[in-house]
Image (tube, helix red, strand yellow):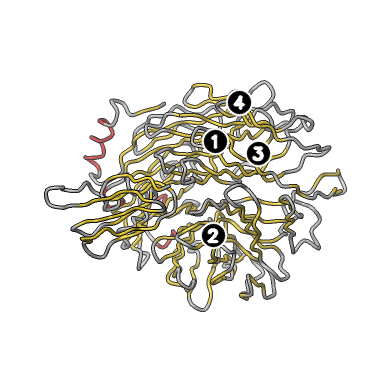
Amino acid sequence: MKKLFATSLMCAAALSMAAASAPQFKWGALLDGTTTAGDQATSLAVSDDGGIYGLYTAGSTDGHLSVMLDNTALFEGSPYSGTSYNNNFCLIRFASDGSAVWNIHTDSGDFASNSGSVSATSDGGCVVMAKVRHTDGYAATPINFVTPSGSRTLEWSAEERYYRLVVLKVSSEGEIEWLVCPEISTAAVNDGCKEFVSEGFNLYAGCVDAGGNVYVPLNLREPMTFGDVTVKPSNVSSWDGDSQKAAGSFVVVKLDSEGNCLGSLAFGGEATATYCHQVVSYGDLLYAVGTAAGSGTLTCGGIEFTPSELNSPVVVSFDSDLTPGWVKCLPGEAVGGKYAVQNLGLTVTNDDVWVYGAFNGKVGDSEGSVESQQGTLREGLLIHLDAADGSWVKGVSSRESTFEPAAANTSLTSYMGVIANPDNAAKIWVYGYGMNAAVGTFIRAYDAETLEGSAEGSWNLVTAGGVPTCQAIAYDAVKGLCYSTTRGNKAFQPLDADLSEAPTGWGVYTASFELPEELRTGVEPVEQSARRIGIRPVDGGIEVVADTSVAVYDLTGRCVYRTSQPTASPVTVSLPAGIYVCAGSKIIVR
């Protein structure tokens, strides 16, 4: 594990001279396959019991199977007879000091890179969703997940290679508790040169709600069967099976905490294609972001909306019964002949929905819009919606704000995440990258109301790495930590400290940073001499008695309950099972 020289002393000294309030680098870990490509980060999540989950794909080929973590062999990957590389599934649980506690990996099978996600569960485990097929030349070999205590095999007959969805529930000890791999229809396609099997779906970033239900976001192109439930796609009548062509439908599939399918939410109506890019859970509601392209009116649970013929961002709020509350469509428009939207995601904080990604052109409606500034290189996209009804609040392009260094305002840019202190609604911080070695991956501060960018409170987290990009960030507001991934092909520099060797090809650097005070919640130790607070777990919640107001937080830093005044008599707070923080102490609710 590449740690700080003399732990944090050298970095802390450099930071105190440059910017006392900047994040402080804690640890970094380099995941590096032996191929020239193939190493990708997909998703990060903070576990309720203090661990960190990282989901990756790592490359291997025949004769080059070793996947390394900081120059130590982590596992042997899958053989592959093709001319490129194979993508191995790799789930790592990190401890708070950055050491790898355990990993689950594959030694057969080929996983789609940048596809799927990991979500922490209230029992300290996680749910992982991924997209898998047989490796080239090894179609008869079952897919094998290697766990800390053994393995779990997934087998299906296939004369041709085609992708299937896999959803795994993993315990905090790294054991696979259940695995779901729905059947999917396949169609033989001949493009005039060769025959191949159609790619029946695209998979994006899902989530788990407080009750343990799992939400899988798809662009569905072929019927997919979960036990006795078959989910059928729309907008595929003219599709020729080419995976690169737009087709299929926005679908969110709901599974219960045991992996049983409970139903699905989908867009209705004729369209070129509709996609679901991410689903998040916040409180009692779910929120999804995706795109739709078509010339007619579409529906979601009876709510009508009209995109443009370009991929238009669409945000949906719905409840756990899959009933939509509102739909917000932001029709796309080309500017200077350029239009694209990529990497769409969303974050919900308090009463706000933050949509982010990369774009050229213009998106918006009669309430408001945002337009790219250069019209050539893609720019970071940030949109603020009201969580109550989806109404437009504000939108901004990354080029509308000036950040340092100067290359930050001319590089191709993508915004990949939003974090916010739940106790401080005045600011938000955007995580992203600029394709320039001097820009790298960063956190940028914005005024939450005006969306004016601020150089104060904005930092480059990791630079160099060639032209580094990023995929994921996880935020622990209670501990004041963030975890991020950076991908590149040269040595990385976290906060100006060169602590990493260069990968053999493209590698993934996962790093931890201690954040400044303004990105931490107000959870503090209680002065017992001045205050009297009593807390104890009860069935289905906690009981509180205090002579001051008290806030209860989950381990993402979200305030789930706050007393409005002192409570002389015990007050019972009903909470889902999980770990919570109150008055600086952890409480386990079962």
Q: Earlier in the sequence, mark 3 or mark 2?
A: 3
Q: Which residue is mark 3?
A: 111
**Residue at x 30% of width, y 39% of height:** 24
Q: Earlier in the sequence, mark 1 or mark 3?
A: 1
Quadrant in which the N terminus appears: top left
Query: Which element is circle 1 on?
Result: strand
Disc 3 marks a residue whose amino acid type is Phe
First along the sequence among labels 4 and 3: 3
Contact? badges 4 and 3 (CB < 8 Å): no
Quarter location, residue 315: bottom right
Q: Which numbered disc, 1 or 3, marks the residue closer to the eye?
A: 1
Q: Which residue is mark 1?
A: 91
* Pointer 2 residue: 359
In this view, the mark in front (1 or 2): 1
Q: Nearer the viewer, residue 300 or 510?
A: 300
Separation of disc 4 and disc 1 at Cα?
15 Å
Q: Nearer the viewer, mark 4 or mark 3?
A: 4
The three-letter code of the residue at mark 1 reads: Leu
Question: CA–CA distance between discs 4 and 3?
Answer: 20 Å
Q: Measure the C-alpha gap from mark 1 to mark 2.
A: 30 Å
- Label 2 and label 4: CA atoms lie apart by 44 Å
Please tell me how crowded label 2 is: few (under 14), some (14-19), or many (20+) other residues with Cα within 10 Å.
many
Quarter where residue 548 is shown: bottom left
Instruction: Give the foreground label among 2 and 4.
Output: 4
Q: Nearer the viewer, mark 4 or mark 1?
A: 4
Q: Residues within 10 Å of mark 1 (few under 14, many from 20)?
A: many
Camera-side residue of 216 and 402 = 216
- Say which residue appears at 27% left-offset and 52% top-offset: 518
The residues tagged by marks 1 and 3 sit, at their Cα atoms, a distance apart of 12 Å
Q: Are marks 2 and 4 in contact (CB under 8 Å)?
A: no
Between discs 1 and 2, the one toward the N terminus = 1
Q: Is residue 344 above or below residue 506?
A: below
